[in-house]
Image: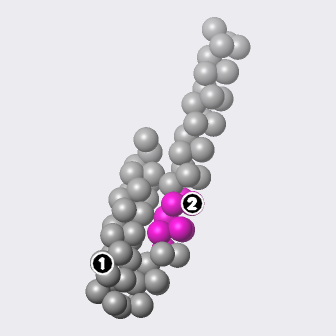
């Protein structure tokens, strides 16, 4: 897993936890954390997809060139 994916997954977990804690305490500012979690989630999936494609290209090149 790329390092940025690891950081993004940590951010997703922390932002969702912050949103839950804030909303349980009755603070509607906790809703601000939810879009941040969405952005971090998109970064996570983008990086995982990019790593998967890079691995597939490397395997294809290795198969073609011996």
Indicate the position of residue 29 as horizontal and vertical percent values: 41, 90
Q: What stretch is highlighted in magenta?
A: 36-43
Which image quadrant: the C terminus? top right
Does residue 40 appear to the left or right of 9 in the view shown? right
Q: Which mark is residue 21?
A: 1
Numbered circle sitting on residue 36:
none
Secondary structure at numbered mark 1: helix
With 27 as the anchor, is 54 left or right in this view? Answer: right
Indicate the position of residue 12 as horizontal and vertical percent values: 42, 63
Q: What element carries label 2?
A: helix
Q: In which quarter of the image is residue 60?
A: top right
Q: Quick check: 22 above or below 8?
A: below
User: Circle 2: is it few (<14), some (14-19), or many (20+) Cα within 10 Å?
Assistant: some
* Residue toward you, 54 or 35: 35
The residue beneath circle 2 is 42
Q: Which residue lies furthest to the right in this view?
A: 64
- Give the camera-side residue of 1 and 63: 1
Q: How far apart are marks 1 and 2 (CA)?
A: 23 Å
Residue at image point 65% right, 29% down: 57
User: Does the magenta run of residues contain 14?
Assistant: no
- Quadrant in which the N terminus is drawn: top left
| Residues at circles 1 and 2 in contact by the CB criterion of under 8 Å | no
Question: Residue 20 sits in which quadrant?
Answer: bottom left
Q: Which residue is drawn at 29% across and 86% down?
A: 25
44, 19: nearer the viewer: 19
């Amino acid at each position: 897993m790329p390092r940025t994916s690891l950081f993004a997954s940590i951010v997703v977990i922390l932002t969702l936890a912050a949103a839950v804690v804030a909303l349980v305490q009755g603070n509607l500012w906790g809703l601000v954390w939810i879009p941040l979690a969405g952005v971090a989630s998109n970064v996570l999936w983008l990086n995982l997809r990019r790593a998967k494609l890079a691995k597939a290209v490397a395997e294809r090149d290795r198969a073609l060139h011996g």
